[in-house]
Amino acid sequence: MITNRKFLNHLDPDTDLASRKLSAIERVVEWIDSELKLSNKRLCDLGCGPGLYTQRFSEIGAKVTGVDFSTYSLEYAKSEAAKCGLSIRYVNADYLIDPLPNEFDVVSLIYCDFCVLSPSQRQALLNRIADMLNPGGKLVIDVAGIAALDQKSEITLCENQLMNGFWAECDYVGMQGTFIYPEQSLALDRYLIVEPNETWEIFNWFQHFTPSSLESELSHAGFEVEHMMGSLTGEKLKPDSNVIGVISRKH
């Protein structure tokens, strides 16, 4: 049920809860293309979901592969690609543990997916991405900036249909506790969802980065930063930027 609910929010063009609004996605794709000239390049989008980015990358001429662990999302992505006559390869895999395709010119990991991973998972994933890329290949990634953590506060909420029905399609009561760990640049959102027939929890850890801390993790895995922006739409990076967007090159 969690997967399906988040999937439905991916497809809502007016919400940023599970994916960016479609207008923002289009700006991201446009900026990445302006920097990397994607036509005829082999691109893999990790955590592709229902194909919101992969479809647009394919439409501008990239040779696209999408990877996601959700069969539900991939079924939708495949059907949309078929409707549009797009040749996109989709791989059902957990990018942390399953075998991944390789020989790509570009690998993308978009919408701050990197931030929910532990330090060891992040380093392992960067090493895996390096193996996926051709020599000189590019990694496109965005993360939450430290300014976003500064704007958070510790809260406790209890609401019917918490987050406007995001967590389940039936009636439910949602409880949220937010905890801040400034020394680790880390936040935790803990959710308890009470439905008529079941109760379950989500622990959403979220790492925040400074430009130097992000560059250090990338460098440790053999990547050199080429562009560091305030987002993947090309905005200038500022001290109060909530997002850091990076294009880095594999050594």
Image (tube, rainbow, N blue to C red):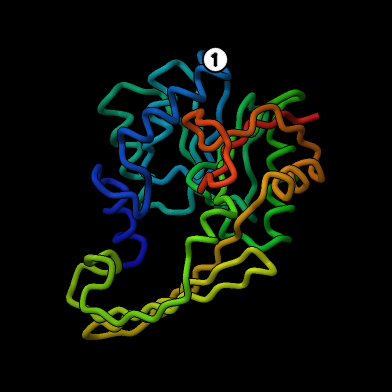
Q: Which residue is drawn at 68% across and 50% down?
A: 125
Point out the image quarter for the C terminus.
top right
Q: Is residue 92 above or below residue 57?
A: below
Work out which residue is located at the far left of the displayed protein and give it.
171
- Mark 1 is surrounded, within 10 Å at the Cα level, by few (under 14), some (14 to 19) or many (20 or more) other residues, namely some
Point out the image quarter for the N terminus.
bottom left
Residue 84, horizontal then vertical, whole percent: 28, 24
Q: What residue type is labelled 1?
A: Lys
Q: Is residue 152 above or below residue 102?
A: below
Residue receiving disc 1: 37
Q: Which residue is drawn at 70% across and 27% down?
A: 226
Q: In this view, does 167 lie above or below 102?
A: below
- Res. 227 image quadrant: top right
Left or right, 153 with reference to 25: right
Of residue 70 and residue 189, the one placed in the foreground of this image is: 189
Left or right, 18 with reference to 235: left
Residue 177, horizontal then vertical, whole percent: 43, 79
Of residue 12 and residue 179, the one placed in the foreground of this image is: 179
Of residue 162 and residue 181, the one placed in the foreground of this image is: 181
Q: How many labels does the image show?
A: 1
Q: Is residue 131 above or below residue 9?
A: above
Q: Mark 1 falls on what kind of element?
A: loop
- Res. 85 image quadrant: top left
Of residue 111 and residue 98, the one placed in the foreground of this image is: 111
Residue 116, horizontal then vertical, whole percent: 56, 60
Left or right, 150 with reference to 138: left
Q: Which residue is drawn at 59% across and 54% down?
A: 146
Residue 47, horizontal then vertical, whole percent: 50, 46
Q: Residue at x 48, y 48 (%)?
A: 68
